[in-house]
Amino acid sequence: MRNRLVTFLTKNKWEVSVVLLLIFVICVVLFYVDTFGVKRSYDQAAWGQFGDYMGGVLNPTLSFCAFVGLMLTLKFQYSESKKTEERQVGQQFDSRLFQMFGLLSTALSTVHLSIVKNIVEETYTGPKAFAVGRRELVSVIESVGPDLSDEETYGLAVDAFGRWSTECGDALLSYFDTLLFVVLYIRNNSSGERRVFAARALRSQLSQDTRVILFYTLLLSGNITLYRFLEGFGYWGSEISENTAPRGRGLLRALVLSKDKSTAQST
């Protein structure tokens, strides 16, 4: 019962304030009627008492009520102004976000990846380029020895990622530059439900191949912050497994351990 009352008062604080103010004014009027009545009096003593009442009680009371009313009005106007500003900021964020989605789509369509196999150069565009790029990246990661510790695997995987970047990464770089810019925009300019919507909307724009490459890119560049941010919105769900992203969990463990050691040394 008490919690309900508190919730009601919190949600309806303006209405409650106005009602209390009106009740106070009505009490003042009733006190006046009870004291002086409603008929005109010609008694000087009564008029003197009335003057004392007006100057000593009613005027200060009404001035206080006017002051409280002014404060409530200013607070209400500020609250409405704040809500309007938040709506405008939200609309601006949404507009820019979908413009960025358009840029991301354009960047995807302009990707061209050339791979030389058996002295024959093959060129792939758009989503097919990411499928091939992902296949090549997984291949070089799998080439790292399986019987090594997580830390040793991580160091060799970074080298392997560098070789892959030389062969394939440059062709995909412009797309991932745009993608990471969108991720940072969402992280730095949104919160609450709007951030959840934006992050999930971006996720729906990405193919599994793109997310696997992004997964390795963040881990092997040591960007645990963005990795954790995207993890919170399901970017590395069941689709990112040992089958689709070999050595992924071991690389994550090695990166976390490395960050923990760095933190311990700095403290």
Image: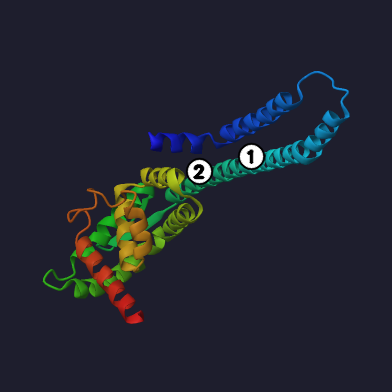
Q: Residues within 10 Å of mark 2 (few under 14, many from 20)?
A: some
Number of marks in picture: 2
Any mark on residue 98, and which?
Answer: 2
Q: Secondary structure at mark 1?
A: helix
Residue 54 is left or right of residue 141, and the answer is right
For the residue pair 177 and 18, the one nearer the viewer reads as 18
Q: Secondary structure at mark 2?
A: helix
Q: Amino acid at mark 1?
A: Phe
Q: Does the image show residue 121?
A: no
Q: Amino acid at mark 2?
A: Phe
Q: Nearer the viewer, mark 2 or mark 1?
A: 1
Residue 201 is left or right of residue 248, and the answer is right
For the residue pair 128 and 141, the one nearer the viewer reads as 141
Q: Residues within 10 Å of mark 1 (few under 14, many from 20)?
A: few
Q: Does the image show residue 186?
A: yes
For the residue pair 160 and 266, the one nearer the viewer reads as 266
- Residue sitting at 46 percent across and 44 percent down? 194
Residue 24 is left or right of residue 252, and the answer is right
